Image: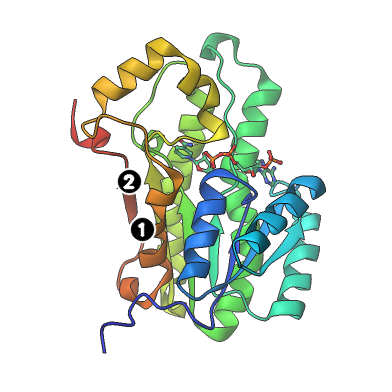
């Protein structure tokens, strides 16, 4: 039977930083395909609001409060989640930030914060979640990369370094954990309409450059990442490992 290849019924999924934007959409998409979803956030008010939003669209989501840079908070939350919901089958490392500044003036604190939040967090959260996956000899990890895992732009050096690192960490995790029947892949979004890109969306010059530069001629919408996420979370991708699926309206295919 191949028609149920994308069915996530009975699976428990954790999506980090999923109170809004891409994480929220991916969580909704995994739920629509049958998964029980847990979302994480570092802000209790935003977490409650997001759980309320899920409830209003008929989805029962579970919430866990932890900062993806804080190893102790991660440890406590993952233990609580496994106790309450059971083994985590699907982990989406989504939480991320960006700080834009010229590299020659880039503040060191911001540099460390971007690398910690976008790259070190993937190691920290995955390390905790993978223990249960190894025990059960199955699991799916999806790391949210970026088109900046491949290319750079002015003022985004820390982000580019972090997302390039996430791409390579994805391959390292895949190489190391494949023997436990764990598949680790990435999704590389192009430019999507979320709070992260708010300033760029409002910047007339950037906006017209992007529309001209993107073969699809527009920004992506967060729900357009659901297809790749469901594929990489499901049995349909059982022999896919260490790959990054770019969902970018064609930007990376052109110069
Ligand atoms: N939008 C794009 O065009 C684009 C393109 C390529 C890649 N991406 C990637 O996609 C992912 C999601 O981005 P988005 O566009 O949906 O951005 P967003 O709307 O700003 O959402 C980011 C989420 O991550 C959370 N977060 C940030 N730092 C955290 C921390 N230390 N601990 C826990 N949660 C934290 C945020 O929570 P708070 O509200 O508490 O900050 C927020 O819920 C990121 O990894 C981003 O780099 C986005």
Q: Which mark is residue 247?
A: 2
Left or right position of 155 against 120: left
Position in image of residue 61 (x %, y %): 66, 66
Indicate whether 226 appears above or below 208. Answer: below
Q: Between 55 and 102, which is closer to the camera in this rendering?
A: 55
Determine the image quadrant of residue 80.
Answer: bottom right
Q: Which mark is residue 228?
A: 1
* Residue at figure coordinates x 44%, y 55% from the top left: 170
Give SS at disc 2. Answer: strand
Q: Are marks 2 and 1 in contact (CB under 8 Å)?
A: yes
Figure label count:
2
Position in image of residue 75 (x %, y %): 76, 63
Q: Residues within 10 Å of mark 2 (few under 14, many from 20)?
A: many
Determine the image quadrant of residue 185.
Answer: bottom left
Left or right position of 156 against 77: left
Indicate whether 23 appears above or below 146. Answer: below
* Residue at figure coordinates x 33%, y 22% from the top left: 210
Indicate whether 42 appears above or below 138. Answer: above
Determine the image quadrant of residue 40.
Answer: bottom right
Q: Between 131 and 89, which is closer to the camera in this rendering?
A: 89
Left or right position of 82 against 91: right
Q: Which mark is residue 181?
A: none
> Disc 2 versus disc 1: distance between alpha carbons?
8 Å
């Amino acid at each position: 039977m191949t028609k149920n290849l994308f069915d996530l019924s009975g699976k428990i999924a954790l999506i980090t930083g999923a109170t809004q934007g891409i994480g929220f959409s991916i969580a909704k998409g995994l739920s629509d395909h049958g998964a029980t979803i847990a979302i994480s956030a570092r802000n209790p008010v935003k977490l409650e609001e997001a759980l309320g939003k899920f409830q209003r669209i008929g989805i029962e989501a579970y919430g866990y409060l932890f900062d993806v840079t804080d190893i102790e908070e991660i440890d406590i939350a993952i233990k609580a989640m496994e106790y309450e919901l059971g083994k985590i089958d699907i982990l989406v490392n989504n939480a991320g930030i960006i700080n834009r500044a010229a590299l020659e003036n880039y503040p060191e604190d911001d540099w460390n914060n971007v690398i910690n939040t976008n790259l070190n967090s993937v190691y920290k959260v995955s390390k905790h979640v993978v223990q249960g996956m190894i025990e059960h000899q199955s699991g799916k990890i999806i790391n949210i990369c970026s088109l900046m895992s491949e290319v750079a732009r002015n003022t985004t050096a820390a982000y580019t370094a972090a997302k390039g690192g996430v791409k390579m960490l994805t391959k390292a995790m895949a190489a190391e954990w494949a023997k436990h029947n764990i598949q680790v892949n990435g999704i590389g979004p192009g430019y999507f309409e979320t709070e992260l890109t708010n300033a760029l969306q409002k910047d007339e010059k950037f906006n017209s450059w992007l529309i001209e530069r993107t073969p699809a001629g527009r920004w992506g919408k967060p729900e357009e990442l659901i297809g790749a996420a469901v594929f990489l979370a499901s049995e349909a991708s059982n022999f896919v490992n260490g790959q990054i699926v770019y969902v970018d309206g064609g930007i990376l295919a052109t110069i």
